[in-house]
Image: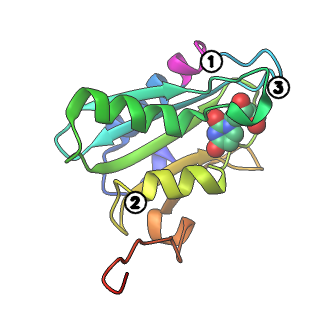
Amino acid sequence: MSQNNTSGISSKQLEALQQKARAVAANAYAPYSHFRVGSALLLEDGNIVTGCNVENASYRLTTCAEQSAIAAAVALHGPALRVRAAVIANLNNASSQPCGACRQTLHEFSSATTEIFFPAQDGSLTRMTMHDLLPAAFRLNTDNA
Ligand code: THU
């Protein structure tokens, strides 16, 4: 991917984001699945924010890496932030497409062209736009409420 990078971000930026996503995955709290995930967000203002998965004995309370990165980004940079690119990595040499809930969470702070990079089934790094990942995202329309 980095050698044939057709995305809006540079190969250097992509490599830096991948490195940060892998680094934060080492902090994952994953005693149940042992699946250590990291996510690095490049914000429109150039800031990079990372997050990892945090599991819980009550399994459904687990926080995914993408969700913890978004929460950290809002805490650090405020509610107006926008995501330019998100990179997901894991330390298990496995594919890790963002789950459905994470797609919706990323969507909240993304545009249709926000780029999401993740390790695919065949081991390559896949790039998809936010729109392609979640074409029919939920939008709250309270106009007629
Ligand atoms: N996980 C993520 O961090 N992101 C996703 O998009 C999918 C799954 C985590 C949650 C859990 O700790 C582990 O991966 C196995 O599902």
Q: Nearer the viewer, mark 2 or mark 1?
A: 1
Q: Residue at x 56, y 65 (%)?
A: 133
Q: Secondary structure at mark 2?
A: loop
Image position of 97 with respect to 139: above or below: above
Is residue 136 left or right of 54 when viewed as pictured?
A: left
From the Cβ of disc 3, is ligand 1 less than 8 Å away? yes
Mark 2 or 1, nearer chain start? 2
How far apart in space, not on screen, are marks 2 and 1 (Cα)? 31 Å
In the rendered image, residue 116, in percent from the top left (x then y), is placed at 48, 52
Is residue 4 left or right of 109 when viewed as pictured?
A: right
Residue type, mark 2 in image: Thr
Q: Quadrant of residue 86?
A: top left
Magenta extent: 22-28
Whether pointer 1 and pointer 3 mark residues with C-beta atoms closer than 8 Å, the reply is: no
Residue type, mark 3 in image: Ser
Whether pointer 2 and pointer 3 mark residues with C-beta atoms closer than 8 Å, the reply is: no
Disc on res. 33 = 3
Disc 1: CA contacts within 10 A as few (<14), some (14-19) or many (>=20): many
Image position of 117 with respect to 31: above or below: below
Q: Secondary structure at mark 3?
A: loop
Furthest residue toward bottom: 144
Disc on res. 90 = none
**Residue, disc 2:** 6
From the Cβ of disc 1, is ligand 1 less than 8 Å away? yes
**Residue, disc 1:** 28
Q: Residue at x 63, y 23 (%)?
A: 54
Mark 2 or 3, nearer chain start? 2
Q: Secondary structure at mark 1?
A: loop
Disc 3: CA contacts within 10 A as few (<14), some (14-19) or many (>=20): few
In the rendered image, residue 69, in percent from the top left (x then y), is placed at 44, 33
